[in-house]
Amino acid sequence: MKGIIFLVFIFIIAQGVSARNKVVYGEDNRLDYYQSTNTMYKELALSTAAMISNDNLSFNGDIVEIEAPTLAGYGVCSSELFAAQMIPANCSGFLVGDDILVTAGHCMQSSGDCRNSKWVFDFAVKYAGDDASMVETSSVYSCKKILSQSLDENTANDFAIIKLDRKVTGRAPLKFRTEGKLKTGTPLVVIGHPTGLPTKIAAGANVRSINDVFFTANLDTFGGNSGSAVFNGNTGEVEGILVRGDTDYLYNSYNDCYKPNYCENSSCRGEDSTLITNIGLDNFL
């Protein structure tokens, strides 16, 4: 079995250690791509990508095969949602220019991070029974260089802007807020790769609070969602970059496995997203 850098046990064993964990609030709103009936959200999903280690990708002509263990294979209870799906993604990202992608700063900290992973679009369950193990080679891109990056423990600013190896085809750059601020209560949807899974679309969230660097919301996100685009649920514009949250999984001693950490919609710490207006995108587009 090929290696996977961002192992799930990092998400579930190091409880309370990493500020970049995430959690489920209220009902689990995560949907596979084919399950969503919202055409706007599905269109937005096409411009989101998974960061996957080169070790988990096999190129075979026009097709790239993705190899990785399943969620259950790393100790999540087999009865849990998506437990049988593979988990190759380390982080998430989204397209903002012809060859410009945004992710979290803690996902892309060095030239080695840039060199050792690919950005894979269309890593999604497109129909019932699809295992998401194959994508077209044209959907896979390399990181050419990191254009700008921040991971500031003092301000909590966390983002990276990267240049891909070529212009992206078959999908449009996402629209994003360029001025002003969203307000508390604004409906949100996040699209990315929770715990490394194929694309998940999760709506039903709202902004709890906001400052000059990030906003906090009750988004259903996990490690692997880091770098996900957080959209205004009404306009479809990117409002932020998912970067931090509460503990992902809790150990269930009765079943000897891990279950997602469930919180009430108004409880627990909430999930943090870097404001998209705070990263200087205009300097690179």
Image (tube, rainbow, N blue to C red):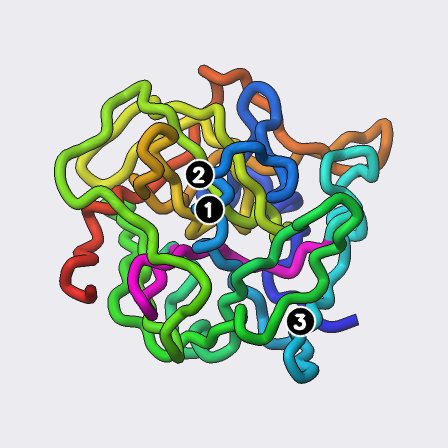
- Label placed on residue 43: 1
Pointer 2: residues within 10 angstroms few (<14), some, or many (20+)?
A: few
The residue positioned 36% from the left and 46% from the top of the image is 241
Contact? badges 3 and 2 (CB < 8 Å):
no
Residue 44 vs residue 154: left or right?
Answer: right
Q: Is residue 275 above or below residue 99?
A: above
Q: Is residue 285 above or below residue 277?
A: below
Q: Which residues are magenta?
A: 86-103
The amino acid beneath tag 1 is Glu
The amino acid beneath tag 3 is Asn
Spatial CA distance of label 1 from label 3 is 26 Å
Contact? badges 1 and 3 (CB < 8 Å):
no
Magenta span contains residue 114: no
Q: Which residue is mark 2?
A: 40
Quadrant in which the C terminus appears: bottom left
Contact? badges 2 and 1 (CB < 8 Å):
yes
Q: Residue 100's spot in the image, x, y percent?
A: 32, 66
Q: Residue 24's spot in the image, x, y percent?
A: 57, 29
Q: Circle 3 sits in a helix, a strand or a loop, which is it?
A: helix
**Res 208 → quadrant:** top left
Q: Is residue 153 visible?
A: no
Taking depth in this image into account, of 138 and 79 the one nearest to the observer is 138
Q: Which residue is mark 3?
A: 56
Spatial CA distance of label 3 from label 2 is 30 Å
The amino acid beneath tag 2 is Met
The residue positioned 76% from the left and 44% from the top of the image is 128
Q: Depth-wise, is mark 1 or mark 3 nearer the camera?
A: 1
Magenta span contains residue 92: yes
Taking depth in this image into account, of 237 and 211 the one nearest to the observer is 237
Residue 76 vs residue 23: left or right?
Answer: right
